[in-house]
Structures are given as structure tokens and as C-alpha cells.
Image (cartoon, rainbow, N blue to C red):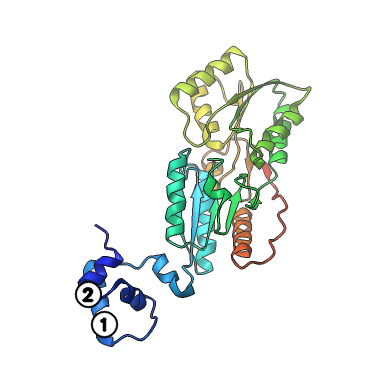
Amino acid sequence: MVAKLSDVAELAGVSITTVSRVINSYGSLSQKTIDKVHAAMRELHYQPNAMARSLQGKSSQFIGLIFPNIQNPFFTALASEIEQLLFEKGYKVIIATSANNVEKEQQYLQMLVANQVEGIITSSHNLGIASYQDNFLPIVSYDRHLADNIPIVHEDNYRGGQLIGEYFVSQNAKNLLVLCDNDASTSPTSKRYVGFADAVAGKSHLLVKNFDSNTFVAPADIAAIVEIVRTHKIDGVFAYNDMMAIQLQNALRKANLRVPEDVIVAGYDGSPIVQQLHPDLPTIVQPIHEAAQRLIDVLFAEINHAALPELDVLPVTLHRPE
């Protein structure tokens, strides 16, 4: 069981306030009292949390990260980049994954506040959480609209969708399927599907199916998509992310459909590991380092009550298989 501040106080025979004063080097205390508290902390293996360190106006030097799913290589890469950049600034991160579980995300938000993180970077896919509407912590969002008062860092989603659409047109794909995670919100991600539709308008037939992008797609859903490809003679599929695209590539090949000769499958994200392991996958490459740096710049502007940096969209590129 993890030791609490009250456990240290009881073992040392002092008040909780005294333990807090020892931890924060605040006030006048005898060396005997200080030694008793430190001895109790060692015996109980007690580690002061960020809240204790933040008392008396001290910085916790912790930043909270909330991402939907770090099994997705893109979010793994983005979290890693943010962690490294923050480490260079003398900060550490607490990472939480929320998937599509609203209650889980609420609890993580409460935990981050309790530990007095100085700010939060989030790419939550759980929309309408009241804690974001009423937040008092500095928060910056990546690619999602969570509340009107939360700034958003995002790439050129419209251009990303447009580039994929132009690629399909250049490959003479006529019957297209879009596997979409559009949640009907005003999040910037919705623009990628608008860009795609605009690029193929009048040149290809378009079919749209909605899926949950927070998880790996179930085998039954993959099988259903393969059947749609067969039934509608689909020759091009735009998946909402690279994980989905790779899952579908594998399933189509098992069903004796050639990729890309019979069906072109394109993804979105372009994380380094996917480009290395699946260089045959057409995908939109998002600028991970630039996004991480922009998120941190915006967050620290909020923390320091400074003017926010320019929130212009970050550019994306198309990875074309050689």
C-alpha cells in the first residue's frame, strides 16, 4: 500500500502540517524534527508528490498528456517527442490514455489536477467533457475542438485529404471507399474528409463508412469491409489512420485481392515506424516534431500568461510508395 502524508506524520509523531513544512523547507523547525520526518519517509518509502512540492508557490514541473491510444504509433511518436522536448526544459510528463472511455478520462483529469500539473496537452476523442469547459488549468488541444476557450494546434487536414484524393485520381481509381472517424464535431480532423471529397468530385464514385478510430478494428468489421470492397468493386480505400490501413491491407491480401494492383489502400499519420516497416503504404505524413514544439510553445504561453504564438496550420506531405 502506498504511504500517505498522514502515515509519515503518525510514524514521526508530528502533525501533517509539520511533515509538509519539512518537505517544502518552509518555516523554522528543529533539526530533531526534520530528522524524525526524514527517517519516517525512508522507512515508509514515501515519495512526496507534485502537490506537496507545489505548496508555497513552488512549481511542480509536471505536464499532463492525455492521448486516446498510445498503441497507435503516431501518438506514441508524438508523446515521445513531447516528453523529450519537455525534459530538455526541466519538466517531466504524466501520460494518460483515454480511448473512448469518458469516465476514465474524467478520473485522469482529476488525478492530474490533484498532482498539480502545470498544464495539460490533450488529443482527447471524448467530446463534451464538462471538465474541459470549466477548466482552470492551462490546456492545449491537438487536432480536437474540446471547448471554445482551449487553443488548438493542428495540421492542414483539408490539404491532407486533398493530397490523398489527388493520389487516387492519379492512379485512376474510380470506386472509392472512405473509412471515416468523423464525429460530426467542429474538430479540424473533419476537414480531411472534405478535402478528399473535393479532390475526387466528378472523377470517382465515393462510398463512406464510419468507424471508431480509438481502437484496432474488430476482425468482424474488417471482414465486412473486405466484403464491401468485393461487392462494390472498390479499387481505392482511404482509411482514417495508418493502423486501419495496414489491417485492411493484410485482410485484402488474405482474401486474394492484390494490393495495390486490385485495391489501393491509403492511410493517414505517417509516423516514422510505419514509414520504415510499411514503405508501400501511401499516407499523409504529419510533422511530429513541429506539432510537439508548437503544443509546448502554446501551453507555456498560457502558463506564463503571455500572448499565444500564431496558430497557423502546420503543413503535411504525401508519402508515395516508390
Q: Position of residue 254 (x, y in %)?
A: 47, 21
Residue extending furthest top?
Answer: 231
Q: Position of residue 143 (x, y in %)?
A: 62, 45
Query: In this figure, which residue is indicated by the disc labeled 1?
Result: 33
Which residue corresponds to the image point at 61% horizontal and 23% vertical from the top-left? 261
Marks 2 and 1 sit apart, C-alpha to C-alpha, by 8 Å
Q: Quadrant of residue 263?
A: top right
What kind of element bears circle 1? helix
- In the displayed structure, would residue 75 be above or below residue 161? below
Which residue corresponds to the image point at 42% horizontal and 59% vertical from the top-left? 114
Q: Position of residue 44 (x, y in %)?
A: 23, 67
In the rendered structure, find residue 12 and report the number of the disc placed on it.
2
Q: Quick one: 24 or 183, which is closer to the camera?
A: 24
- Which quadrant of the rendered structure holds the C terminus? top right
What kind of element bears circle 2? helix
- Which quadrant of the rendered structure holds the N terminus? bottom left
Left or right placement of residue 1 versus residue 118 in this view? left
Q: Position of residue 152 (x, y in %)?
A: 64, 50
Which residue corresponds to the image point at 69% horizontal and 23% vertical from the top-left? 173
Q: Earlier in the sequence, mark 2 or mark 1?
A: 2
- Residue type at tag 1: Thr
Q: Quick one: 95 or 52, which is closer to the camera?
A: 52
- In the displayed structure, would residue 84 be above or below residue 103? below
Which residue corresponds to the image point at 25% horizontal and 69% vertical from the top-left? 8
